[in-house]
Amino acid sequence: MSTSKTASMIDDYERDGVIRVRGLFSQAEVLTLRTELERYMREDLAEKPADARTQEPDGKTVRNLWRIEVHHPAILPMVEKPEIVALVSKLVHGEPLLVGVETFNKPARIGSGVPYHQDNAYFCQSPPDMLTIWIAMDAVTMANGPVYYVRGSHKHGMLPTKPSGVKGNSIGLAEAPAVPLEEQLCGLLEPGDALIHQCETIHHSAPNHSDFPRLGLLLVYRGQHTQTDAALKAAYTAAVTATPPA
Ligand SMILES: O=C(O)CCC(=O)C(=O)O
């Protein structure tokens, strides 16, 4: 990535709290990752502890994989790229630590929606130098439940929350923002493209009613200097207790 391209991505990220990066992973890398995630779900997941996944309301389809870095660390060499770490260090203003590898599977016709939320309600970090890289394993279209982001919303701090009742996304915003959908950034992607959002950027997604899956692989990084905020942590603990595992 050229120095001027990186500089403009950093500017866009600071302004909007979200950027799109085309071709972060090659088609060959996406195929390898997708194949390995499917194998992990088919062959290993049943033996893993409950905090390794959330299921859709049908009680059998996997909605999310959580803590892949703990439960299946063999995937780490496939996602830890020096160019990603170099970019993330600029965005988190410090030494990047990869603290989460997870998925939002959104399987065809079954995948549920994600309520409006800010990730820092889950991460509870101060300063909010933490981000998610959302990597498309499938084409993301208007039909299969793209993620929408409210540009600039990371600049207004944490907003009031309420329990959402959605397993896997238990903490939603108390009120949906007034910004109309057509003014939000719609995360349409080709496989291998990514969106990077700051942990206080408001985002959400609709259910997948289409015949096409929409698997997203997420890498969560924080700066080594961030610390847990006690008030955010207390609210998170209450929500997780009501709707485990997260
Ligand atoms: O993949 C989705 O639909 C939601 C993703 C999300 O909430 C996130 O990236 O934090």
Image (spheres, rainbow, N blue to C red):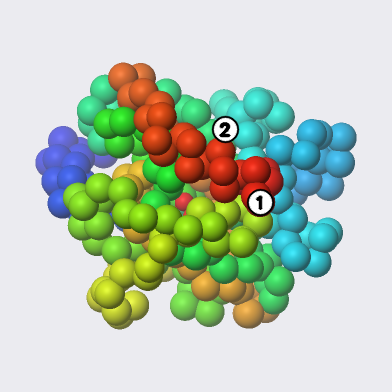
Q: Crowding at label 2, few (<14), some or many (≥20) Cα neighbours within 10 Å? A: some
Q: CA distance from mark 1 to mark 2?
A: 32 Å
Could you say where residue 53 lies in the image, as x and y percent from the top left?
71, 45
Q: Is residue 158 above or below residue 180?
A: above
- Mark 1 close to ligand 1, CB under 8 Å: no
Callout 1 secondary element? loop
Q: Which mark is residue 78?
A: 2
Q: Which residue corresponds to the image point at 57% horizontal and 32% vertical from the top-left?
A: 78
Could you say where residue 207 lies in the image, as x and y percent from the top left?
58, 73
Q: Nearer the viewer, residue 39 or 89?
A: 89
Q: Which residue corresponds to the image point at 26% horizontal and 22% vertical from the top-left?
A: 94
Q: Earlier in the sequence, mark 1 or mark 2?
A: 2
Q: Quadrant of residue 85?
A: top left
Q: Nearer the viewer, residue 78 or 108?
A: 108
Q: Amino acid at mark 1?
A: Thr
Q: Which residue is mark 1?
A: 243
Q: Which residue corresponds to the image point at 21% horizontal and 52% vertical from the top-left?
A: 156
Q: Is residue 5 above or below residue 90?
A: below
**Residue 78 left/right relative to 1:** right
